[in-house]
């Protein structure tokens, strides 16, 4: 049996490969690639899109101030959409999971049993939830660049000046109806101030039981075929004068200017669809070094840490159903991140992303060298970006562990911020805190010589492998404080250097690619164009683009992750044709995390589905869209409507959406 290759050796081999010669790679445009900014929509090829079935013009989607995209909202890191003039919002069940979990008790368990508000008085406040939507965009590129230049040549000072200017520009927008965020596009080549309305009174309206909303559990997560009814309805409320407000009994439903009409016509293979939402983060323009260190170090470490944390939490609550219920949302998030890390490792290797980047970089070098003008603009740019990425990669394990100590243990984080040693030692620790810290301490002992944490080594030598109480962990936290300050200084300096070279790197790639160019996702409003289609995951296998209630019933085991509720089975058997109702469909939309809950609309702008996942072969799609494997998974909206008519009736909501109740 071959022995596993140590992380330090794996990354060294990958970095050596990055420095080796590589073959050229021809470029090609991909029809449905791209997460487009609203301001870029007018430049899309609408003649081609209309030939594919789009019946809307660019101004219908976004006219510079508003449009169909205005119906898409952001809700707690997910996407959603208004579907009625009375503030009704639909998103994914997993996006509403935390609110459903928080409202549940063992006696009234909405996670397990589902929830249907009989009327608006019965709608439940969603603790910690808010909804935001775009009002306008301001181009603040000149202001941010001026602040950066005024800071001088010190990279960290430039970075801090930019952050201060962002805060200043955001604070300029103050009022009951508006707030703002300032974000970079194209690695800081451009900056936008996004003026938003944030609605703070959000209430749970309708959620299916977990056996529908999470059907298939972690077994089916990131997989196809799927039969998951991943949907939940909320409603946004405002004060009687229409202004955003915290929860109050006399608040009234928000009345949006734009909402989506729900279609029951469905979609067929080959149909054009569009995904609107707030994709979180993609890494399309990373170098070979940056991708290599993530494949070899970052994602394997994440997988190891999250796998252990899930085990610790499950074992800690195994005999306490009430405590287990309280952590269900945390467990779900960790499990999703765990499988994402697994998919990244598998997908980056299977897709040969590092090799592809190497070939692209070789072609870029040749392209720059072949023209005097390009040499003047771009000579040395790639090498500068590679140098920054190599500097970051050389300390990735060390910095990852420093982050994990403070992010994965709440007790350790409180110790770090305690005002003195005595206060730090009094911080309460759970059994899970102890196990997490012991796991991280074990990983810290394995750090390569070039990345040792000297403060940890000294502490470890003193305290050994015995039982370590809060006093010992508090001592470690306090001793690591200089390392955290150094880490922040390092990141500030690199961020400042990237502010200078990043825009040039992006401009180089934009010119080299010679096609329409979109910025990486950054949790801001985007539009993706797609086609409903299946795919071939491996030789000899073809996945159809649709699943049905019949397939859901075929998976039923009567327990665990595959337990179809009796009400669903009874309804499926009660009416001819019910088993043929479609549950989910595939398309080749360019999506990522944050697109969960995104409305999927047809060529007429009508809601036909809710995006909720990608296929496993596309987990690594954050690093590159692929026409053969990039597939997103959506709930067919007709499945929730069937449940709302015939299984757990909500005729008042159907009427509100302008739909028949039978």
Image (spheres, grey):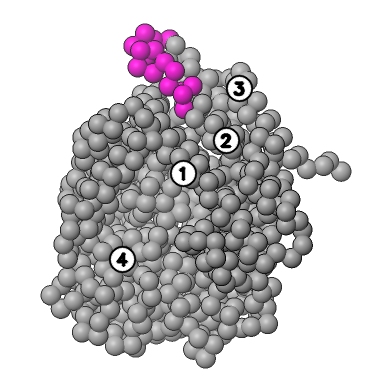
Marks 2 and 1: in contact by CB < 8 Å?
no
- The picture quadrant where one finds residue 77 is bottom left
Q: Point out the tag, 1 or 2, that comes first from the N-terminus.
A: 2
> Label 2: how many residues lie within 10 Å, few (<14), some (14-19) or many (20+)?
many
Magenta stretch: dominant secondary structure: helix
| The disc label shown at residue 19, or none | 3
**Residues under labels 3 and 1: Cα distance?**
29 Å
Name the secondary structure under disc 2: helix
Label 3 element class: loop
**Does residue 560 show up?**
yes
Residue 513 at x, y = what percent?
A: 40, 26
- Seen from the viewer's position, the closer of residues 378 and 510 is 378
Mark 4 touching mark 2, by CB under 8 A?
A: no
Please name the residue that numbered disc 2 is placed on: 393
- Residue 602: x and y in percent read 33, 56
Among the two numbered marks 3 and 1 on one chain, the one whose residue lies closer to the N terminus = 3
Q: Which residues are magenta?
A: 370-385
Q: Earlier in the sequence, mark 1 or mark 4?
A: 4
Tell me the distance, in whole angstroms, between the alpha carbons under discs 4 and 3. 47 Å
Q: Is residue 314 above or below residue 250?
A: above
Residue shown at the point (63%, 53%) measured from the top left: 303
């Amino acid at each position: 049996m071959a022995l596993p290759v140590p992380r330090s050796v794996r990354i060294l081999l990958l970095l050596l490969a990055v420095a080796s010669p590589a073959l050229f790679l021809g470029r090609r445009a991909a029809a449905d690639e791209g997460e487009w900014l609203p301001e870029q929509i007018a430049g899309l090829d609408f003649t081609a899109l209309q030939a594919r079935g789009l019946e809307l013009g660019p101004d219908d989607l976004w006219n510079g101030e508003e449009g169909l995209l205005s119906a898409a909202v952001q809700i707690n890191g997910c996407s959603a959409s208004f579907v009625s003039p009375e503030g009704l919002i639909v998103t994914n069940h997993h996006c509403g999971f935390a609110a459903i979990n928080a409202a549940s008790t063992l006696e009234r368990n909405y996670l397990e049993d589902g929830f249907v508000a009989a009327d608006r008085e019965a709608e439940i406040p969603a603790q910690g939830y808010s909804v935001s939507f775009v009002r306008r965009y301001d181009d603040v590129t000149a202001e941010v660049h001026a602040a950066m230049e005024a800071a001088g040549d010190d990279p960290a000072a430039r970075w801090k000046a930019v952050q201060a200017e962002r805060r200043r520009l955001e604070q300029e927008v103050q009022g009951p109806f508006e707030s703002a965020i300032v974000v970079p596009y194209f690695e800081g080549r451009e900056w936008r101030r996004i003026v938003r309305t944030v609605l703070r009174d959000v209430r749970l309206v309708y959620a299916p039981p977990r056996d529908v909303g999470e059907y298939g559990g972690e077994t089916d997560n990131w997989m196809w075929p799927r039969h998951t009814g991943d949907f939940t309805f909320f409603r946004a409320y405002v004060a009687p004068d229409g202004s955003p407000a915290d929860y109050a009994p006399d608040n009234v439903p928000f009345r949006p200017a734009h909402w989506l009409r729900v279609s029951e016509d469905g979609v067929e293979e080959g149909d054009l669809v569009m995904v609107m939402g707030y994709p979180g983060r993609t890494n399309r323009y990373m170098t070979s070094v940056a991708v290599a260190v993530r494949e070899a170090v970052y994602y394997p470490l994440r997988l190891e840490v999250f796998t252990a944390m899930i085990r610790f939490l499950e074992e800690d609550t195994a005999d306490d159903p009430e405590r287990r219920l309280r952590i269900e949302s945390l467990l779900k998030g960790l499990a999703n991140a765990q499988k994402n890390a697994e998919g990244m490792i598998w997908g980056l290797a299977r897709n040969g992303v590092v090799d592809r980047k190497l070939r692209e970089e070789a072609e870029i070098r040749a392209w720059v060298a072949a023209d005097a003008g390009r040499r003047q603009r771009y000579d040395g740019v790639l090498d500068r970006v590679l140098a920054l990425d190599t500097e970051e990669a050389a300390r990735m394990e060390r910095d990852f562990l420093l982050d994990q100590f403070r992010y994965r243990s709440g007790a350790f984080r409180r110790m770090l911020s305690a005002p003195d040693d005595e206060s730090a030692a009094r911080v309460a620790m759970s059994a899970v805190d102890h196990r997490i810290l012991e796991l991280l301490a074990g990983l810290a002992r394995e750090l390569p010589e070039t990345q040792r944490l000297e403060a940890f080594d000294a502490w470890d030598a003193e305290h050994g492998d015995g039982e370590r109480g809060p006093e010992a962990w508090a001592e470690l936290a306090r001793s690591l404080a200089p390392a955290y300050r150094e880490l922040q200084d390092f990141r500030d300096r690199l961020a400042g250097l990237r502010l200078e070279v990043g825009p040039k790197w992006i401009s180089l790639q934009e010119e080299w690619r010679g096609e329409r160019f979109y910025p990486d996702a950054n949790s801001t409003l985007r539009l993706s164009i797609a086609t409903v289609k299946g795919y071939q995951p491996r030789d000899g296998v073809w996945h159809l683009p649709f699943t049905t209630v019949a397939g859901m019933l075929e998976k039923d085991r009567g327990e665990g992750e595959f337990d179809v509720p009796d009400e669903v089975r009874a309804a499926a058997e009660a009416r001819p044709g019910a088993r043929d109702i479609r549950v989910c469909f595939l398309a080749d939309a360019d999506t990522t995390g944050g697109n969960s809950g995104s409305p999927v609309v047809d060529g007429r702008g009508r809601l036909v589905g809710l995006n909720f996942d990608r296929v496993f072969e596309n987990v690594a799609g954050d690093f590159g869209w692929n026409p053969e494997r990039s597939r997103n998974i959506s709930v067919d909206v007709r499945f929730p409507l069937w449940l709302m008519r015939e299984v757990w009736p909500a005729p008042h909501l159907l009427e509100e959406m302008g739909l028949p109740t039978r």
